[in-house]
Image (spheres, rainbow, N blue to C red):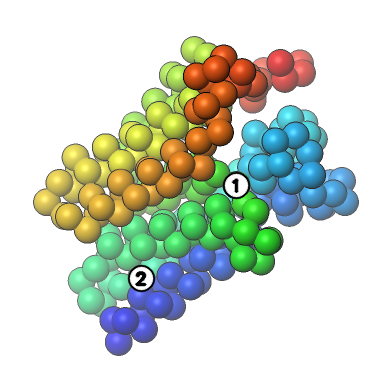
């Protein structure tokens, strides 16, 4: 029964990950596909750059919401086996993979920052808050979303490794998720090193730089 529960939890979370907020909202507000604009990424930053901030909240709600649902469902499925926390992490991994590599969208997804944040908050709010603080500090100091995202991903891995240092499974899973997010930002990292990364004005007035 445990194996069946793991498969069902992982598959459900993966399919939820295929529900991409930026792709859905670009189709609704513009009859378009956000991946045909800008960086080609199906994420919040490219959505804002391409369509403005008007509908960005719905992108956040969709991507964060699916991660919360995926984690909670997986946690409930594995809870009878005494693996609630591991179930939450399984849901996080599967929904992130589904978001980054969505089979229903031609395997062209986003980079998982909103999903990762929502998953972290669902699994342990302390790690989630630490992630937000690190991202916010990096972003407001530099206006580089990618830098905040990479540092936030590292905080995810370090945070869960410290809080759950007695659980090799959770440590390995958190390192995998953080590493996956950093890998998805490899192009951004290269541009940051070269001084070619584009800054983004997520919250203020005016156009993005």
Count the marks: how many? 2
Quadrant of the image containing the N terminus: bottom left
Q: Which residue is mark 1?
A: 110
Taking the spot 49% from the left edge, 66% from the top edge, the residue there is 13
Q: Is residue 13 above or below residue 112?
A: below
Identify the image quadrant of residue 9.
Answer: bottom left
- At which x and y percent is residue 19? 63, 60
Q: Is residue 199 left or right of residue 67?
A: right
Q: Nearer the viewer, residue 96 or 106?
A: 106
Q: Earlier in the sequence, mark 2 or mark 1?
A: 2
- At which x and y percent is residue 36? 79, 44
Q: Is residue 61 above or below residue 129?
A: below
- At which x and y percent is residue 10? 43, 70
Quadrant of the image containing the C terminus: top right
Closer to the camera: disc 2 or disc 1? 1
Within-10-Å neighbours for mark 1: few <14, some 14–19, many 20+: many
Taking the spot 50% from the left edge, 71% from the top edge, the residue there is 12
Marks 2 and 1: CB-CB under 8 Å? no
Identify the image quadrant of residue 86.
Answer: bottom left
Mark 2 and mark 1: Cα distance apart in space: 27 Å
Taking the spot 17% from the left edge, 55% from the top edge, the residue there is 168
Label 2 residue SS: helix
Q: Which residue is mark 2?
A: 76
Label 1 residue SS: loop
Taking the spot 50% from the left edge, 19% from the top edge, the residue there is 193
Q: Is residue 158 left or right of residue 144?
A: left
């Amino acid at each position: 029964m445990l194996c069946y529960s793991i498969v069902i939890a992982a598959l459900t979370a993966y399919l939820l990950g295929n529900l991409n907020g930026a792709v859905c909202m670009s189709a609704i507000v513009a009859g378009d596909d956000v991946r045909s604009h800008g960086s080609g990424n199906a994420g919040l930053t490219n959505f804002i750059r391409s369509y403005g901030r008007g509908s960005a909240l719905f992108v956040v709600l969709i991507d964060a919401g699916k991660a919360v649902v995926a984690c909670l469902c997986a946690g409930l499925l594995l809870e009878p086996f005494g693996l609630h926390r591991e179930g939450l992490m399984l849901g996080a991994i599967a929904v992130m993979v589904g978001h980054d590599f969505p089979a229903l969208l031609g395997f062209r997804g986003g980079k998982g920052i909103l999903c990762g944040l929502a998953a972290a908050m669902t699994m342990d709010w302390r790690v989630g808050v630490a992630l937000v603080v690190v991202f916010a500090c990096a972003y407001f100091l530099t206006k580089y979303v990618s830098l905040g995202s990479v540092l936030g991903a590292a905080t995810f891995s370090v945070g869960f490794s410290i809080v759950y240092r007695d659980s090799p499974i959770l440590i390995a899973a958190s390192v995998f998720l953080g590493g996956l997010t950093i890998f998805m930002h490899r192009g951004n990292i290269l541009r940051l090193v070269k001084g070619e990364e584009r800054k983004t004005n997520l919250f203020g007035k005016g156009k993005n730089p």
